[in-house]
Every structure is written in structure tokens, then in C-alpha cells.
Amino acid sequence: MNQRKPTISVITMGCSKNLVDSEVLLGQLAGNKVRVVEDADEAEIAVINTCGFIESAKQESIDAILEAVRRKNEGKLKKVVVMGCLSERFAAELRQEIPEVDAYFGSHHLKEVVKELGIDYKVELLGERRITTPSHFAYLKISEGCDNPCSFCAIPLMRGGHRSRPFREIVNEARHLASRGVRELMVIGQDTTYYGLDDQGGRTLGRLLSELSSVEGLEWIRLLYAYPAKFPKDILEVYRDHPKLCRYMDIPVQHASDDVLKSMRRGISNRALRDLLHTIRDLVPGIALRTTLIVGYPNETERDFEILCDFVREMRFHRLGVFTYSREEGTSAYDLGDPLPTEVKEERRSIIMQLQQEISEERNRCLINQTVKVLLDRVEEEYLVGRTEWDAPEIDQEVYVKNDGSLAVGNFCQARVVDATEYDLYAEVL
């Protein structure tokens, strides 16, 4: 007689790369006919896929672990399993501080996690992700790890060096996702522009994007995490020739002061950054550029910050996010200390975000009475809420389309913008 399999909840912290890892695990569980529940209160086993990127993310992961341990101590859970970046980096410390967790695994131990859950690991299920995003879009991870030497970043400590996934494996996964109804793919990795440099005989990102554009059923392909140093400009020709590639690119520049960029070990100067961004805009007209910045880096002076503000004003990014510097043990910047007070970091972040808010509102108001293509993500009261090709899910702005009953979530529509705020558009179906 077969033993009853436990009910499992998988809790994912952190970025989209972590989300894909959880989806691969969920595919193994589904293939073994394990009952998976979204509500952790209904589970017998909790699996927590942790993030260890910056201090706030680490604390969120620890809070999730402690909550699961509390429920275990109350008899509401039979087992707590922790995996992912935080336990990859701090396994010994976690075992000592939170011994109530039944097992800790790093970010590359899917087979061991599956075994710990008492089910069979099946190689044939590796391409069978259980998509947790709305069914019409998905993330496609093309690589793992990072070889860039950024002084502030702990990702190589948790994810290791860059490893490109095999070209054909990626394309086959994209076809499989499209066959299941996915219309939009987000191409992700710690550094997507490094794809193929490690083991595939030179730059192949352009060839990969071109091949993905030929996948039947896909309508939008979105590139995230493009590293600016040694940016492969040949992909801009691919963008120009393939309309399925969203006129959107995420390029985290982090800073604009030459002194800070050098200390951060970013491998690029202010002038080179500006030239690159202007080149992208010249060769791909209408492209929306997204970036992220770090303020409060240890040696960031008032002058450095002024240079950054001037850069934001000049470049007028369509989308922008700002992090305050987080001192991470094991990184080369750790020895610089953390001399800037929290209130200074937060003030600088607020100044940048205020600048960006004004830029965003100006850009959005220029879209009033324009027609935009919208992918509809969800229903909210009297609206269908979606995104343009200039917006990635969760991190960018949305379009609120008046619901006339003719469309459903997962559909594309043409809509006329009738109003705009700093970060949202309001539109009517044409």
C-alpha cells in the first residue's frame, strides 16, 4: 500500500531567479502527485526558498523561517525545510541559530531537497516547471551565477560563477511554455549579456533572442538584467529586426560618478555609460530603458551624488529603482565600512525618486490620447489591469483599462490613454 504523501507549501522570497527555482521544485512535486497548497496554514511541510541579497531581504527570509518554526512548535507543521541563497551563504550560522529547522540546503541542491521531502527526483521533470505567475507570462532563466567583480554584491558568494544554460535547452523550454499558453517571456539571469561567453564559443545572446523570437505563440520577449560593461551591441540589430522583442531593456547602472563606479568595480565610466545608453536609443527608437541605482555607497560624496542626480536628469529613464547601500560580509566593499548614516542614504534615495517621479509623470502625460498595446494581467474592480511593452510585471507601472466585458485576462488589446499619473495610465479599449 502506498504511503500517503505530505501536503507541502513552497514559500518563495526574493527575485525572479528564485521564483524559477521554486517553480522547478514545484514541477518535481506535481510530477510525483504531491498536493501543493499556497496557504501555508494548510500544509504539513513548509519549504522556504530564501533570499540573501541585501540586509532587508535577509531579514524577510529569517522572519519567514521563524514563523514556520513557530507553527512547527505549535504542532501545526511536521517539517520545515530551508533552501536558497541565504542558506547557501550562511548555512552554519543558521543551523546554530535556528536548529528547529529540519534541513538546510543551498541554491544548487534541488535533488537533495526533493529527497528530503520523501519523493523521487525525476530528471525527466526538469523542464516541467509549475508556473506560479499568471499563466500568460513566465520567466526564462538563461544562466546561473555571475563572473562580474562588483565590490558591493554578494551574488557570486551565493550563486557561484556564471554558467550558461545550453542553447537548445532554453529554446525548447520556451516552446514548451508557449504551448501552455505563455504569451510573454522575461529573459533573466544574473547577467544576461554574458550569456554564451563561458562555454558556447562567443556571444550568442543575439542568436538566442533571435531564436526565441521565432517561437510560435510568443508575442513579447523582454530582456532583464543586462550588464552595461562590455554590452554586446550586436543585439541591437536583433531588436531592430524582431518586433517580438519588447522595446524595453533593463540595464542596472548602479551609479554615474567615475570615482564611485571605479570603487564599485563596475568596469565602465560615466562617459561610456552615457554613450551606451544614447546608442541603444539611437538604434532602437522608442525603447524604454529601466535601471537601478545604489545611493549611500561608502565613499559617495555630496559631489558624487550631484553627478548621479545630473545623470538621472539627462538620461530620463522610463523606469528607475533605487536601493540604499547594504554592507555585505564577504564582499570587497565590506572593508570600506558603512560610514554614511541611514538618514543620509534615505534622503538621497528620496531625492532620486522625486526626480524620477517628475520624469515619469512628464513621459506618461505625453501618452494621453495615444494608442498603446496592453497585455491584461488581472481584474481590479471595474478595470482590467495590464502593462505596455515598456513595463515588466511587479516592478514597473500598469495600465488601468475600463472593463467593457469584451476582454479577459491574458488577452492583448489596443487601448487609448485617457489619463495619466506618475506611475500609471488609464485607458479605454478601442
Image (cartoon, rainbow, N blue to C red):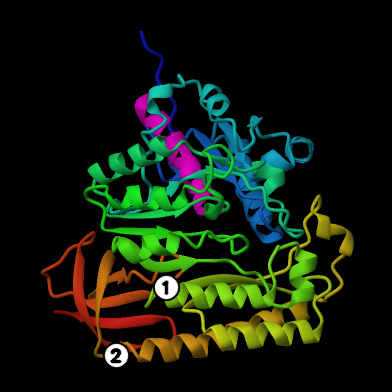
Which residue type carries mark 1? Leu
What residue is at 76 percent from the left and 64 percent from the top? 264
Label 1 crowd bin: few (<14), some (14–19), many (20+), radius 10 Å: some
Q: Quadrant of the C terminus?
A: bottom left
* Whether residue 381 is situated above or below residue 198 in the rendered picture: below
Question: Which mark sits nearer the N-terminus, 2 or 1?
Answer: 1
Mark nearest the camera among 2 and 1 is 1
Q: Residue at 46% across / 85% down in the picture?
A: 360
Categorize mark 2 by other alpha carbons within 10 Å: few (<14), some (14-19), many (20+).
some
How far across and how far down the image is residue 15, in percent?
A: 54, 54
Q: Which residue is mark 2?
A: 368
Is residue 312 within the magenta segment?
Answer: no
Rendered residue at 64%/33% (across/down): 105
What amino acid type should be assigned to the residue bearing mark 2?
A: Ile
Residue at (64, 57) in percent of width and height: 57
Residue 4, horizontal then vertical, whole percent: 40, 19
Q: Which residue is denoted by mark 1 in the rendering?
A: 283
- Please indicate whether residue 408 sits to the left or right of residue 247 in the image: left
Specify the segment rendered in magenta.
8-34
